[in-house]
Image (cartoon, helix red, strand yellow):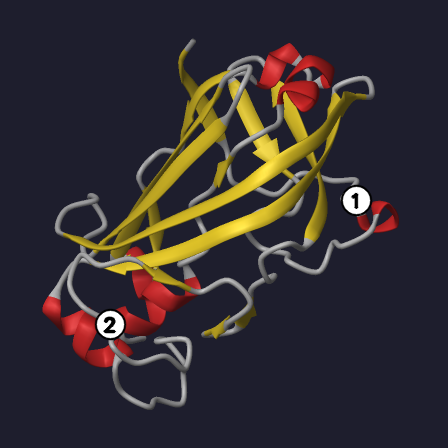
């Protein structure tokens, strides 16, 4: 699988959500702090890697996902950021239900090979159907189809769940599902990706 397709498949790994003060007051304290994944293998035979870091405080949640060319997380290729407003967070016995509104979702290619591929009309839609990609310049992909994913547009309300067990945090939908647009679609099971507490 080409590196550029891999980057498109993993371009939704990063998240940065900015909650309102009222949401912070309602939110569960257990999800606050800094959370980071291991260097996770992706692609054919796990030849590439990525790391995502999320920081949650009373007033905001920020995260950045960095994708790398090598499985040991060397040679950055693409960085992804998402920003939205957290408007509700309620602990329901270990499952924290959240509602957030999509603000921005950007992808930033870090190397020329990725830029060149993204700017081509390709069947894998790695470049989200957009042109004008440049090295280290973020481009909005909110509401766009990038590879197999169609991202939610800015202003979309998404409903998710977060589970915290000891020093581990997992989401129920983010960043795989973008169609959980009603409370009835709130996930009841966590995804496999684990974020470890790396700071308070």
Residue 165 locus on image (x, y percent): 62, 18
Image point (76%, 44%), residue name: 187
- Left or right position of 37 against 50: right
Q: Tell me the SS state at disc 2.
A: loop
Residue for badge 2: 133
Image point (48%, 52%), residue name: 104
- Left or right position of 137 against 40: left
Quarter that holds the N terminus: bottom left
* Mark whose residue sits in front, 1 or 2: 2
Quarter holding residue 132: bottom left
- Left or right position of 121 against 135: right
Residue 65 locus on image (x, y percent): 35, 44
Quarter holding residue 117: bottom left
Quarter holding residue 58: top right
Image position of 31 with respect to 6: above or below: above
Q: Residues within 10 Å of mark 1 (few under 14, many from 20)?
A: some
Image point (28%, 50%), residue name: 49
Image point (67%, 38%), residue name: 190
Image position of 11 with respect to 51: above or below: below
Q: Residues within 10 Å of mark 2 (few under 14, many from 20)?
A: many
Total labels: the figure holds 2
Q: CA distance from mark 1 to mark 2?
A: 34 Å
Using the image, tell me which numbered label, if any, was put on residue 158. none
Image position of 82 with respect to 145: above or below: above
Quarter that holds the C terminus: top left
Residue 109 locus on image (x, y percent): 23, 61
Q: Nearer the viewer, residue 26 or 29?
A: 26
Q: Nearer the viewer, residue 65 or 6?
A: 65
Residue 199 locus on image (x, y percent): 38, 13
Q: Tell me the SS state at disc 1.
A: loop
Residue for badge 1: 186
**Mark closest to the chain's N terminus, 1 or 2:** 2
């Amino acid at each position: 699988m080409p590196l550029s397709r891999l980057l498109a498949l993993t371009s939704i790994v990063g998240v940065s959500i900015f909650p309102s003060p009222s949401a912070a007051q309602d939110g569960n304290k257990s999800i606050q702090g800094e959370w980071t994944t291991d260097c996770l293998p992706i692609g054919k035979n796990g030849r590439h890697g990525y790391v995502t870091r999320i920081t949650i405080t009373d007033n905001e949640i920020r995260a950045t996902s960095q994708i790398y060319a090598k499985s040991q997380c060397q040679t950055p290729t693409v960085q992804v950021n998402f920003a939205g407003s957290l408007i509700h967070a309620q602990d329901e016995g270990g499952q924290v239900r959240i509602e957030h509104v999509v603000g921005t979702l950007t992808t930033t290619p870090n190397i020329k090979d990725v830029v060149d591929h993204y700017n081509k009309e390709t069947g894998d839609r790695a470049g989200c159907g957009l042109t004008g990609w440049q090295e280290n310049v973020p481009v909005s992909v909110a509401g766009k189809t990038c590879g197999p994913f169609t991202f939610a547009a800015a202003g979309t309300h998404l409903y998710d769940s977060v589970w915290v067990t000891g020093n581990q945090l997992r989401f129920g939908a983010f960043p795989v599902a973008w169609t959980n647009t009603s409370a009835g679609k709130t996930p009841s099971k966590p995804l496999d990706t684990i974020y470890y507490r790396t700071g308070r």
